[in-house]
Amino acid sequence: MTSRRFKFDFWLIVLIVSLAAVGLFVIYPLSNLVATGFQDQQTGYFSLVNFQTFFERPFFYQALFRSFAVAFTTTALAVLLGASMAYFSTMYKIKGKRVVDILVIVSMLSPPFVGAMSWILLAGRNGYLSRFLRDLFGMELPSIYGFGGIVLVMTLSTYPLIYLFTRGALRKVDASLIEASESLGCSPLKKTLTLTFPLIAPTILAGSLLAFMDAFSDFGTPMLLGERFLVMPVLIFRGFLGELGGWRNFAAALSLIMVVISIVMFLAQKYIIGKKSFTMSSLRPIQQKTLKGPAAVLVHFFIYGVLAFSTIPQTFVIYTSFRATRGPIFIDGFSFASYERVFRVLGTAIRNTYVYGLIAIAIIVVMSLFISYLTTRRKNFFTSLLDSLTMLPFVIPGSIIGIILILAFNSRPLLLIGTPAIMILAFVIRRLPYTLRSSSAILRQISPSIEEAAISLGDSPVKSFFKTTAIVMMPGVISGAVLSWITIINELNAAVILFNVRTQTMPVVIYNELHRGAGFGPASALASILILTTVVSLALFFKLTGKTEISL
């Protein structure tokens, strides 16, 4: 049995190459992070001084508490908004439901730092709304900077995750369970709290983990809105590249703390879901009811109100991209000057964004096809190990991905710093787990008998894979890759660590323009191009899959 399983064939070669690639580009960089974090900055010897410094000085460890405060508050608000919206839109007939779903998806796929930019333009100290209320009514808006502003932006970008997870789970609830509870005299509120939400709690928890990790690890939003409210990703960035530059060992130690917390959160979520989850078969899906009277008004007002707030960044950024500018400030009138400037001066960043993204997606698609087949159809110790290792980047914050790649590939013979290769590598590492999981899910739905039939007609196992399984998988793999593509072109956390003048992408340029206060016009124009690309990519996704919505 052992000799047959490990026979030196095509799939064994793929397994060896895949393990070697993961070892070189994931495990080796992580080991460098560990070594650097436990190294004394002065002597170079093994030491715990970096961790001691962190836990002894309030300035440092309070940044961790602030990160937790942002992440937990954001997650709680995202669950409240997302789960409520999903419940109402599943249980009741909502006018414009198709538009609601599309706008929720666009809100989810637009990067948080675009939201931060929009709220600065709208409600910053000299924002449009701030000036309007100040000049007309003498009112001062609450500050968009600090804890409140960060939570607002992160909540509006993460609640769609909860919405999609919850909606998918509610559609699997059998209507007969709800009818049985009603026949036993349950009130609508009691039915919801004691039956419906406990049934979908594991799914909401899974979505909550993603929302928590997004808020905990995001760099762009707190960097733009935080000011004196310092969180861990910003502290790590400053220790590695910024004001505290030269504190690489200390920044590596902080990165290790974040990685450990992320892994613990991930394992805890998996354990809880494993204990609480169960299978539901919806023989009779929930039938939507029609709301009437004040209840209908309140539900529609709630859904439309949340959508209005979450789409403000996209609509307002597009509007400001056409405003006339003089240097870094807006003036009266409209103009295409911002677009002319970005295509004339910043065209390299636009080209880099699309070229690097397409190369990364091509690599991700090929790796997902092979690795998902190994881990799903050829299970053994080594393929299970490969499956676990490829999922490891899922729990590593993006900025830390950038840091470990710098630590690992900053000298010959593996000198990748400053090259397009390291940017593409970061994109592949960041997004491979997502496409890989969707590919494995698709493969589990394909019967092995398809390959067996091809083999019985004389094809080799490898040839049968390429002629049958890969072709059947491809539409689903590509549709998953489209969603990964959207997140790649909007990637800031890793890119802002790794870029140089020749390899900068649109998100990096937007961040730099805002951070320097050099020009909101060009930043808005680039953000509008990203939003348009996101919408076109979504249309491509719907075309490829034949779906009218996205489910998670």
Image (cartoon, rainbow, N blue to C red):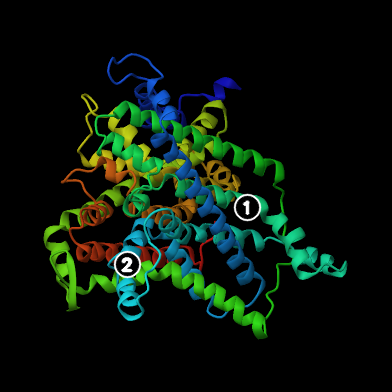
Q: Amino acid at mark 1?
A: Thr
Residue at 49% across / 32% down in the picture?
Answer: 260
Q: Can you say whether 278 is above or below 255 in the image?
A: below
- Quarter of the picture containing the C terminus is bottom right
Q: Does label 1 or label 2 sit earlier along the sequence?
A: 1
Q: Position of residue 354 (x, y in %)?
A: 26, 55
Mark linked to residue 203: 1
Query: Which of the two residues, 504 or 317, is positioned nearer the viewer here?
Result: 317
Q: Residue at x 70, y 58 (%)?
A: 197
- The Cα–Cα distance between marks 1 and 2, rounded to whole angstroms, is 31 Å
Disc 1 to disc 2: CB gap under 8 Å: no
Q: Residues within 10 Å of mark 2 (few under 14, many from 20)?
A: some
Q: Which quarter of the rendered picture does the N terminus lie within?
A: top right
Foreground residue, 228 or 311? 228
Residue flagged by tag 2: what amino acid is it? Leu
- Residue 532 is marked as 2
Residue 186 horizontal/vertical position (percent)? 83, 67
In the figure, is residue 297 to the left or right of 124?
right
Q: Residue furthest right?
A: 184
Q: Residues within 10 Å of mark 1 (few under 14, many from 20)?
A: many
Q: Quadrant of residue 551?
A: bottom right
Q: Residue furthest bottom?
A: 293
For numbered disc 2, what is the local secondary structure? helix
Q: For numbered disc 1, what is the local secondary structure?
A: helix
Residue 327 place in picture, x, y as percent:
13, 65
Q: Residue at x 71, y 51 (%)?
A: 279
Indicate the position of residue 69 as horizontal and vertical percent values.
Answer: 50, 47
In this picture, is 119 found above or below 356?
below
The answer to whether residue 343 shows anywhere in this view is yes
